[in-house]
């Protein structure tokens, strides 16, 4: 067993994470969190649906931003997928998806302001990058033999439609539906920076300690995600897509001179703007790198490493909750399965930002709340996917039960896909550390947020580019590892 | 189906843009989200209605999520008037030449911050102009990074009194995001001490949101100028000559307690840009302003 | 078009010569059976022919059939006619097939005994049904030449004859790789035997008996 490359790599990751725990700041310092937490849980069990004046509107906006953003992203991604083999396209897609949608929103806020376009593009752009990559993988995996029998003289569009797209269609639909759920989460989270979605009211109520309102908003959001399959029917999608652009709200008018100002002034490094030239730029950049970028990179890497391993461990512990091999298939089993499904929906739909803040109350300011928040959120997502995968496994009728079934039958079979999911998630976890930076944990996101709060976009842009490069680096590393371990590269395993 | 989808969107989006760009623009204002922001829309809607009556133009209030977003909206001319804090006002006026501070609250020339601490920290309230030495070595939370009362001025006084940066004075420094959150973090013991606007503290205590057995005020900073209304210089060109004076007058004339409660202030008095020079200097000193 | 010719063709696989050099001329209206042991190079020769004669209207029916499992039988057959229609028509047909195409394809499916499967997904069919769908597609393509690799390998007795009859009726000019020697003799004019990548036999079918071909196996 110890000779297996998979096992050795896994252990390497765990050892590295343990080493990181020693250098990370994990001190627990809260003394009396129970009063505050008590209020919070009371709010969750006694939600007050009447407290938010704009509840209906917030839900409509959350859906509208998700549909338009994901729709545009999917359409653009599909076109890009056709030319994805070009290096320029691949690199640009890697770059745009390496920047978190919150950062995209913060950038667009600077020149489009509180206009719906800000929220739409903040979702559509990174999603287009993700869609392009995954769609290209799905299309590549389709059987090439039907292309050979296409009659000579058939147009390119017809040929693609009848061979590649027709074959890939079910996979494209499944993946796009999954992405729609992510889009709903992204749309809600964009409220944190001022878009009129659920997150707007969630953040406000949370900041004010109005936990009954927080409870109401969260329950609504869980319900929206948990019932996605019921209302997001393929036949209804065109109608949703048609209606969504008209339900975004009107926001504030765009002034186009702000756009040119952003590119010609705001993001030009300050020494260049002041006419100091290269002589001023070097110390400016050096200062930024030494005082913000390097500490930010270090903390981001440490936090990501620990969170990744914690996510993995949590996933392995949780997937049986939604696997019928453990819950059983009869009535009580299905009830247990539904409960497990509910637990995972709550885990993956609670914005990690909120989880981190709740845990911050519990343990005080350190990396611990961030690690646990990331592990819960991502563990919920991968647990759900692995559980679903486990339901595709058929066991012999006399297979062992309980812990033996877990350890000998299922986990070894699911370990490959599990690692593949986790490596895909690696880059995403790193991207998410950015949001926690906004909460005060000194990742790169913390310094980006500081620069934006100080209205210094020249600094913010340098730090965002560094963040993107770091993400691309991790993505490349993850791909190398996947190839080395020969984890089957199925596009649908992209969470 | 994806083809159909992109077709729909390519038709619908430009339409949406066209409709939102066209049309006469109303006079828009915003306020920094310093505290009770859930009811911000509701409360400031009353102010918007009042201004619309006084100015005889369409007036709209737009809520934002951060101090920086308020400054950006002002700078981008998406809002023409804003209720800023001391620092955000200076940031905004620095970026919009010709903009003017026109009114501040009666309380604002002598605004102050409260340093609060958890009972378990062992701190006891002290009088006087210098920060208590006992703060050294504690964990400490500021509010928003661009708050005047929750960060800028307290940091300035702390640096002066201790002769060191906050990271050196305290064992750990955090930014909670806003005043209410600072109070709840200190009350839970997550941080041993923190600093908040005195108005925010009084509001939260009056609303019964503070466990005064767990957290108390231990020091009051010296006074400094804070909140003010700032208006863009180009409003006269857009809304008619003398428009900014009319806005100023309307603000100064505001005497309905229901309106003033939104801020909360007992009334408004005239002010100009120079009254915030001290904030400007401190901002530069702390490398928050260029 | 009077004749089709391959001159000095070769095929290499991993640096080793697997076929040729060989020459082969195909007259218009001539049906040729390619026979030989599996691995002798029949499929390789067929794919070379496809590369050479694709533009002259060759319809291909490969051994792996090339069906799109997620599309209906109708659409798989319709694919044979893609080049005859503009792209918008083909896309529209993917969403909702046109009456006239249904009317054209249904009799073909009826003749091959799979009309009841018209709207089933190709992926749900048995091997024999799939092979008939691929044959229907090749027929619907209405090319000038058919290149078929084991077109009836998954069909038994009467069905195999039915499909062979339909294919040869639609394509007077054809090259058919076959292992059923008896069927090959009945439905073709000429037999080309391949052994070790070269032509080992080339005779008119009427002069051959099943025994004559056994030497190739």
Image: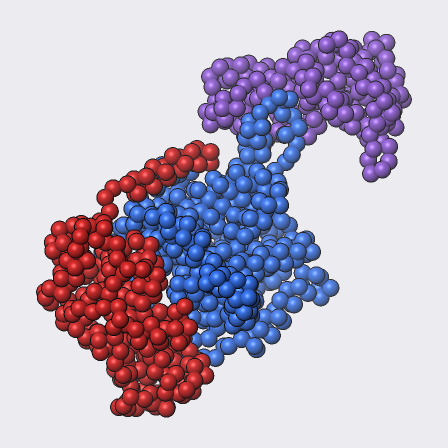
Chain colours: A blue, B red, C purple
Residue at 39%, 43% (x, y): give it.
A68
Tell me where residue B183 sits by quadrant: bottom left
- Quarter of the image with the N terminus of chain A is bottom right
Residue at 30%, 43% (x, y): give it.
B20
Q: Nearer the viewer, residue A319 or C83?
A: C83
Q: Residue A388: horizontal and vertical position, in percent?
A: 52, 51
Q: Is residue C176 above or below residue A376?
A: above
Residue at 66%, 32% (x, y): give it.
A145
Q: Is residue C40 found left or right of A81 in the rendered image?
A: right
Q: Single out the residue that lies furthest toward the front.
A: A275
How many callouts does the rendering have?
0
Q: Nearer the viewer, residue C83 or C68?
A: C83
Tell me where residue B135 sits by quadrant: bottom left
Residue A29 shows up from this direction: no
Q: Is residue A24 found left or right of B226 in the rendered image?
A: right
Q: Nearer the viewer, residue A292 or A321?
A: A292
Residue C51 shows up from this direction: yes
Q: Nearer the viewer, residue C107 or A198?
A: A198
Q: Is residue B280 above or below residue A344?
A: below
Q: Is residue A333 found left or right of B24 in the rendered image?
A: right
Q: Residue A211: horizontal and vertical position, in percent?
A: 29, 66
Q: Is residue B107 above or below residue A455?
A: below
Q: Residue B195: horizontal and vertical position, in percent?
A: 32, 79
Q: Residue A9: horizontal and vertical position, in percent?
A: 66, 64
Residue at 34%, 83% (x, y): give it.
B157
């Amino acid at each position: 067993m110890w000779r297996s490359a998979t096992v050795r790599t896994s252990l390497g990751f765990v050892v590295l994470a343990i080493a990181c725990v020693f250098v990370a700041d994990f001190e627990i310092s809260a003394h009396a969190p129970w009063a505050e937490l008590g209020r919070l849980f009371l709010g969750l069990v006694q939600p007050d649906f009447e407290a938010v004046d704009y509840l209906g509107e917030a839900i409509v906006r959350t859906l509208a931003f998700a549909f338009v953003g994901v729709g545009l992203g999917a359409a653009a991604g599909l076109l890009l997928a056709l030319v994805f083999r070009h290096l320029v396209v691949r690199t640009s897609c890697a770059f745009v998806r390496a920047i978190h949608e919150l950062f995209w929103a913060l950038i667009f806020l600077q020149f489009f302001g509180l206009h719906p376009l800000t929220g739409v593009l903040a979702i559509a752009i990174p999603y287009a990058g993700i869609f392009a990559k995954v769609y290209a993988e799905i299309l590549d995996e389709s059987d090439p033999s039907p292309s050979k029998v296409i009659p000579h003289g058939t147009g390119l569009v017809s040929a693609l439609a009848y061979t590649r797209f027709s074959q890939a269609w079910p996979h494209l639909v499944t993946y796009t539906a999954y992405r729609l759920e992510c889009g709903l989460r992204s749309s809600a989270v964009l409220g944190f920076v001022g878009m009129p979605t659920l997150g707007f009211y969630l953040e406000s109520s949370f900041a004010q300690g109005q936990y009954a309102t927080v409870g109401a908003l969260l329950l609504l959001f869980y319900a929206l995600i948990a019932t996605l399959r019921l209302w997001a029917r393929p036949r209804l999608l065109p109608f949703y897509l048609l209606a969504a652009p008209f339900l975004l709200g009107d926001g504030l008018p765009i002034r186009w001179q702000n756009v040119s100002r952003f590119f010609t002034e705001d993001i030009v490094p300050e020494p260049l703007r002041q006419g100091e030239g290269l002589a001023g730029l070097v110390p400016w950049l050096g200062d930024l790198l030494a005082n913000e970028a390097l500490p930010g990179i270090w903390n981001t890497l440490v936090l990501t490493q620990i969170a990744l391993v914690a996510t993995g461990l949590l996933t392995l512990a949780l997937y049986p909750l939604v696997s019928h091999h453990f819950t059983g298939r009869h009535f009580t089993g299905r009830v247990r399965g539904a409960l497990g499904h509910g637990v995972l929906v709550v885990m993956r739909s609670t914005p990690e930002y909120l989880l981190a803040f709740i845990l911050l109350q519990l343990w005080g300011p350190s990396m611990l709340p961030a690690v646990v928040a990331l592990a819960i959120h991502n563990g919920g997502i991968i647990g759900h996917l692995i559980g679903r995968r486990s339901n595709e496994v058929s066991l012999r009728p006399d297979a062992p039960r309980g812990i033996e079934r877990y350890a000998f039958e299922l986990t070894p079979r699911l370990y490959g896909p599990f690692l593949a999911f986790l490596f895909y998630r690696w880059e995403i976890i790193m991207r998410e550390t950015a949001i926690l930076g906004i909460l005060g944990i000194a990742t790169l996101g913390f310094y980006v947020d500081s620069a934006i709060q100080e209205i210094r976009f020249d600094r913010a842009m340098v730090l965002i580019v560094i963040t993107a490069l770091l993400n691309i680096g991790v993505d490349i590393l993850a791909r190398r590892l996947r190839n080395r371990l020969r984890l089957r590269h199925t596009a649908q395993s992209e969470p | 189906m994806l083809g159909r989808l992109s077709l729909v969107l390519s038709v619908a989006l430009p339409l949406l843009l066209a409709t939102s760009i066209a049309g006469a623009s109303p006079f828009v204002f915003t306020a920094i989200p310093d505290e009770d922001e859930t009811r911000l829309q509701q409360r400031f809607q009353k102010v918007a209605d009042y201004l619309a009556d006084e100015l005889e133009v369409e007036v709209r209030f737009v809520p934002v999520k951060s101090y920086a977003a308020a400054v950006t909206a002002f700078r981008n001319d998406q809002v023409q008037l804003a209720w800023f804090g001391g620092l955000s006002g200076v940031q905004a006026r620095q970026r919009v030449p010709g903009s003017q501070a026109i009114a501040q609250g009666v309380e604002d020339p002598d605004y102050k911050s409260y340093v609060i601490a958890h009972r378990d920290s062992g701190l006891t309230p002290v009088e006087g102009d210098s920060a208590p030495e006992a703060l050294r070595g504690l964990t400490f939370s500021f509010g928003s990074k661009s708050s005047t009362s929750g960060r800028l001025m307290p940091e300035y006084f702390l640096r002066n009194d201790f002769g060191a940066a906050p990271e050196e004075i305290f064992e750990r420094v955090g930014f909670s995001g806003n005043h209410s959150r600072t109070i709840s973090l200190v009350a839970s013991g997550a941080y041993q001490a923190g600093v908040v606007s005195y108005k925010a503290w009084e509001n939260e205590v009056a609303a019964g949101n503070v466990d005064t057995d767990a957290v108390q005020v231990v020091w009051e900073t010296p006074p400094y100028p804070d909140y003010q209304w700032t208006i863009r210089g180009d409003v006269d060109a857009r809304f008619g000559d003398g428009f900014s004076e009319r806005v100023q007058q309307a603000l100064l004339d505001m005497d309905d307690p229901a309106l003033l409660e939104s801020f909360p202030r007992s009334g408004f008095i005239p002010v100009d840009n120079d009254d915030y020079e001290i904030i400007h200097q401190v901002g530069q000193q702390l490398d928050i302003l260029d | 078009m009077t004749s089709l010719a391959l001159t000095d063709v070769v095929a290499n696989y991993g640096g080793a010569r697997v076929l040729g050099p060989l020459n082969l001329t195909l007259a218009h209206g001539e049906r040729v059976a390619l026979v030989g042991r599996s691995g002798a190079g029949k499929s390789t020769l067929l794919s070379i022919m496809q590369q050479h004669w694709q533009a002259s209207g060759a319809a291909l029916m490969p051994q792996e059939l090339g069906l799109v499992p997620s599309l209906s039988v109708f659409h798989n057959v319709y694919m044979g006619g893609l080049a005859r229609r503009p792209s918008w028509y083909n896309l529209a047909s993917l969403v909702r097939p046109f009456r006239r195409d249904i009317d054209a394809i249904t009799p073909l499916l009826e003749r091959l005994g799979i009309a009841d499967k018209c709207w089933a997904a190709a992926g749900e069919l048995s091997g024999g049904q799939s092979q008939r769908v691929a044959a229907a597609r090749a027929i619907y393509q209405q090319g000038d030449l058919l290149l078929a690799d084991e077109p009836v390998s998954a069909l038994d007795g009467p069905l195999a004859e039915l499909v062979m009859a339909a294919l040869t009726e639609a394509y007077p000019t054809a090259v058919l790789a076959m292992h059923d020697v008896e069927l090959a003799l009945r439905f073709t004019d000429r037999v080309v035997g391949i052994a070790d990548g070269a032509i080992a036999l080339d005779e008119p079918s009427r002069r051959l008996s099943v025994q004559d071909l056994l030497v190739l196996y």
